[in-house]
Amino acid sequence: MKFINTIKNVFKIEELRERIIVTLGLLLVYRFGAQVVLPGVDASQLADFAGKFDTGLGGLLNAFTGGAFANASVFALGIMPYISASIVVQLMQIAVPYLQKLQKEGESGRKKITQITRWLTIGICLVQAPSYIAGMQYLGVPPEAFVLGLTPTFYVSSIIILVTGCIFAMWLGEKITDKGIGNGISILIMVGIIATLPQSFAQEFASRVLESNGGLIMILIELLIWFVIILASVLLVLAVRKIPVQYARRTASGGYEKNIFGARQFIPLKLNASGVMPIIFAQALMFVPSAVAGLSDSNLAQSILATFSDIFGLWYNVVFAALIIIFTYFYTAITVPTNKMADDLKRSGGFIPGIKPGTDTAEYLDRIMSQITLPGSIFLALIAVFPAFVVKLMGIQQGWALFYGGTSLLIMVGVAIDTMQQINSYLLNRHYDGLMKSGKNRKAVA
């Protein structure tokens, strides 16, 4: 009943209702575009090409575009060029003075940084688009699939369409953020990942039940394990270390004197302050050894290629986990400004009991972050490599195993939590008791 009442409350708020409808409408446009094949390509000839993206690195890449990559869709590049550009710009802000200056200019600076990110996205698309078209014929697409042939006209038109598709997807994400609910770019990625979930589960169900490979009992066990991993991911995303803060006593006169204290009595330091970025960084580097090894025909190069092409192999996951731990420390260090936090705390009249304001506070916060980042990074690495465990120990289909951890699961959990928190804020603003069953609409205030 509480859940039903909560849903009713969601749709009673006109603004929230409109935002949800806009979000669903834009997501429908995105999913429709993922099924539209590039002009000049025969969709019926793409079976072998799509088969390359069922498992392994190809399956992981295809999952982020919701199957558009394997469909040779106009959205084949997905939103990932924009994510790559955002990461590059974010890292450049550490070393480039101009970007550091823009970052301090407030809203106007953020707008300029956004424009730089957009232009860099176009640049990345102009590199990826021709590479994607050229790679199609080497990954199983027969020559007859190209109706007009691999002519310069086809190349130019396809590149323009792929770049436009990525920019349009970026625009959809920004519109969802502005007019809808949640972070638009993250929601597009999540929807793309979820789009492949039903097919992956159907393949696993057929393997277990129809082929008598464990039956329904194994399906129930797998779902139970999946539920536990989701709970663990939620805990990882929400876990914080609360640092107690005390504010200097002040008085205010309003006919009488009263004590005023800061409403926020602690600093929440997240156990996993870097989110899924360490996994994305590590995954990007894991492509490098196989790409370099593919340039040579030596036995050593072929051995390296085989090792780093199997995302469920032992050494792949050992290196992958080590990189995640390293990048967690690196990304946390550049995204959690302990010096700025200490300065802001000092200016607001706050201090950590037993710690001197200023440099000592910054060092204390930095030490605490280092201590909680270690278990957080190990936990993150374990979740990232867990799909390999379920494949090797339980014989789960590789496509279904990708949802047992890694970037896919953490993105779904993180985006779901962020979206629900935004919906909760609307409910709490319009209802006295928020999500409580007895919540009542507040009277409008003139």
Image (cartoon, rainbow, N blue to C red):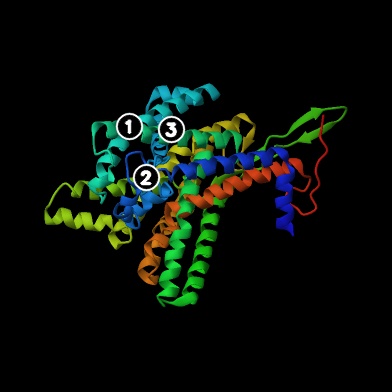
Location of the C terminus by quadrant is top right
Q: Quadrant of residue 148?
A: top left
* Dot 3 crowding, Cα within 10 Å, few <14, some 14–19, many 20+: many
Q: Position of residue 205 (x, y in %)?
A: 45, 69
Q: Earlier in the sequence, mark 1 or mark 2?
A: 1
- Between 138 and 437, the residue placed more toward the observer is 138
Q: Is 241 positioned to the left or the right of 41 in the image?
A: right
Residue labelled with disc 3: 167
Of tags 2 and 3, the one toward the viewer is: 3
Of tags 1 and 2, the one toward the viewer is: 1
- Between 205 and 337, the residue placed more toward the observer is 205
Q: Earlier in the sequence, mark 2 or mark 3?
A: 3
Q: Quadrant of residue 73?
A: top left
* Dot 1 crowding, Cα within 10 Å, few <14, some 14–19, many 20+: few
Q: Position of residue 177 (x, y in %)?
A: 56, 36
Tell me which residue sits at (49%, 53%) in the image: 194
Residue labelled with disc 1: 157
* Dot 2 crowding, Cα within 10 Å, few <14, some 14–19, many 20+: some
The type of residue carrying mark 2 is Phe
Q: CA distance from mark 1 to mark 2?
A: 32 Å
Tell me which residue sits at (50%, 62%) in the image: 229
Tell me which residue sits at (51%, 36%) in the image: 172
The type of residue carrying mark 3 is Ile
Instruction: Report if the CB atoms under discs 2 and 3 are less than 8 Å apart.
Output: no
Q: Position of residue 127 (x, y in %)?
A: 30, 34
The type of residue carrying mark 1 is Ser
Q: CA distance from mark 2 to mark 3?
A: 23 Å
Q: Position of residue 349 (x, y in %)?
A: 64, 32
Residue labelled with disc 2: 281
Location of the N terminus by quadrant is bottom right
User: Which structural element holds mark 3?
Assistant: helix
